[in-house]
Amino acid sequence: MQIVRCPCGKQLRINQEHIGKRIQCRACGEVLLVEDRLDSHPAPGHSDEKRQEWWTGILDMFRPKWKNSDWHVRLRALEALQKQSVVSNLASADPNGDVRRAAHARLQQLLAARAEGTEDYVCGEDAVSELEDLGLLAHVARNATNRFVRLAAARKTGDQALLVGMAYGDPDAVEMLDDQRILADLAKYGEDDSVRTAAMKRLKDERLLADAAIAALAKHHEISIMAAADYMKDPRLLGEVAVRAQDEALRFLVRIDDAAIVQWVAENALTVPARKAAEVRLDELAQLEALRTAPQDFETLVKALVSIASYANSSLRGFLKQEQLTRAIGYRLNSLGGMPMMLKAHDAVRSMRGRVVGRELEVAWDGIGQWQG
C-alpha cells in the first residue's frame, strides 16, 4: 500500500494495482496521478531522502494541518485557525513566505474581531495596539462594542473624517480634534450638551465661541449657554452675547468689569431681561468701585449685605448671583477684623433675613481668609 497526499491535505491510501493510474480525491475531487513510490514501509537500500519522505507522510497523518509539511496545506488551514498564538507563530516563523504573509493577514483579522467584540477596554485596547491594517482599524472604530475601544481605533487611524463623524455623538472624540472650524460646528450642532460643551472647551477662537453661544441661546440649550459663559473671556464678545440673551444675560454680564460695555448692553439690549440684567450689573460695578475707593465701616458693609439679601429670591440679585460684590464685601470685612468680623456680619444678616439667606452668604464667602462655606 502507498500513501498519496492530495494538495487539499487529504491523505489517501492507494493499493499497488493503482500505481501509474489516475485517481480522484474523495475530499476535493482533484484528479491525481499515482506515481511508483514506496510501499507502506521503505525497503532496505532506499535512500535516506525517501525514508524521510515516508516518515513525513506518516507524521502528516497525525498532526494538525497547520503543522503539515506541505505549505499549501498550511496555507489553507489558516482560514479556519482561531488560536491567535498559533497564527502569530506562523506569521513569524513559518519557512514559507506565502504562509507568513497569509498568517499575518489572518492575525490582523483575529485582532480586529477581538477588539470589536470585547466589553473589556484593556483587552480591546491591547488588540488595537497590535492592529496595523487601516481598513480593519476603521471597521473597529465604527463597530466595536466598547466606545473607548472605538476611540482608540479611530485615534490610531489618524483619519480626521472618521473622528469628526464620531465626535458629533461622542464627547471623548471631540478631545482628539483641534481644527477650530470643526470644533465650532460641533459646538453648534453636536447631538447633545456633552458634545457641545466639550467642543466649546477646546475652542481657542473666541469669535467662534461667541457664535456658538449665540446659537445656544437661539436653541435654548441651557447647559451649553452656561459653558460658553464660563469659557469666554473677551468682554466685548461677552457683551455681544448678553445683548441677545433672555434670563441668561447676567451669566455673561458678571464676567464684564468694564462699565462702558455693560452700559452699551443696557442701551442696546434686544430683550427686556438683558436690559434689566445690565442695569443690575451697572449698580454692582458702582458699589464695587465705592468699596475700592472709599473707606467702609462695619455698619456700612452690613447694610450693603442686607441690601443684596433683600433680593434673595430674585433671578438677578442675591449673594450667589452678585457673588463678585458679595465676595468683595467679605474681603473688606476680613481685612478689617478677620474671621470674627465676618462672623459678626454673617450673624447680623442671618438674624434679619433668615437661615436660608445666611447659608447662601456662607457659600458665597467660601475661601475668603479662613472662611469655609
Image (cartoon, rainbow, N blue to C red):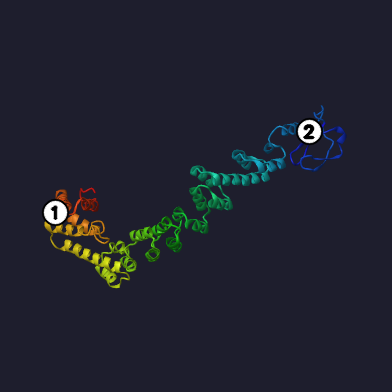
Quarter of the figure with the N terminus: top right
Q: Is residue 359 left or right of residue 179?
A: left
Crowdedness of circle 2 by 10 Å Cα count: few (<14), some, many (20+)? Answer: some
Looking at the image, can residue 297 be seen?
A: no
Question: Is 279 in front, or is 110?
Answer: 279
Say which quarter of the image contains residue 47: top right
Q: Is residue 120 left or right of residue 285?
A: right
Q: Which mark is residue 154?
A: none
Q: Where residue 296 sits: x, y (%)?
A: 13, 59
Residue most extreme to the bottom: 267
Which residue is label 2 attached to? 50
Say if 348 sits above or below 183 in the image.
Answer: above
User: For the residue marked with disc 1, what is the amino acid?
Assistant: Leu
Question: Is 176 in front, or is 303?
Answer: 303
Secondary element at image label 2: helix
Question: Is 55 in front, or is 64?
Answer: 64
Crowdedness of circle 1 by 10 Å Cα count: few (<14), some, many (20+)? Answer: some
Q: Where residue 71 sits: x, y (%)?
A: 71, 41
Secondary element at image label 1: helix
Q: Earlier in the sequence, mark 2 or mark 1?
A: 2
Question: Is 246 in front, or is 298?
Answer: 246
Q: Where residue 124 sits: x, y (%)?
A: 52, 44
Which residue is label 1 attached to? 336
User: For the residue marked with disc 2, what is the amino acid?
Assistant: Lys
